[in-house]
Amino acid sequence: MTGLPSSVLFACNHNAIRSPMAEAMAKRLYGHAAYLDSVGVQPAELDSFVVAVLDEIGIDLHRHHGKSFDDIDPSSFALIVTLSPEAHHSALEFTRSASTDVEYWPVPDPSAAEGSREIRLESYRRTRDIILARLKTRFGAPSGPTI
């Protein structure tokens, strides 16, 4: 399956790092070509390193608020992209009675990095770049702004 579906939900553990990154970059790349959103298994406050590494590429994520699977309707999405094993399991349970496709994109959790601020930022940048490359590979080259 290639191309951008009409609606895509990105999911990770807390809707604080990977899924908001994916949502924000997809919105930048594909604009209003699809409905794009994100959730977490257990929502948490947005990670400040995510804000920093997205600011570096001109994406403002300061107003993001975490959501869970309970906050959405699975039938509203043509595709759920899961970015962690926990989110994948939850998405499969969540879509049991919906005709929603689920894809697993294993993406490392950058918050596991230890060390100086710069070492940690590099971990977040790698995660950002992995997600960005995967978006472009899976959904195609954007017709609008690029990152």
Image: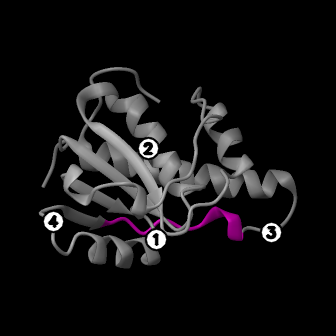
Closer to viewer: mark 4 or mark 1: 4
Image position of 39 (left or right of 35): right
Give the camera-side residue of 57 and 7: 7
Nearer-N-terminus badge (3/1): 1
Does label 1 or label 2 sit earlier along the sequence?
2
Q: Amino acid at mark 1?
A: Ser
Residue 110 magenta: yes
**Discs 3/2, front:** 2
Q: Is residue 117 visible?
A: yes
Per the image, label 3 sits on a secondary structure element best described as loop
Query: Considering the numbered disc 2 on the image, is that residue within a helix, a strand or a loop?
Result: helix
- Report crowding for label 1: few under 14, some 14 to 19, many 20 or more residues within 10 A (C-alpha): many
In the image, what residue type sits under mark 4? Ala
* Residue position marked by numbered label 1 in the rendering: 84
Instruction: Please state which amino acid type lies under the numbered disc 2.
Output: Glu
Give me the C-alpha separation between circle 3 and circle 2: 26 Å
Q: Nearer the viewer, mark 4 or mark 3?
A: 4
Q: CA distance from mark 4 to mark 1?
A: 21 Å
Residue 98: image tag: 4
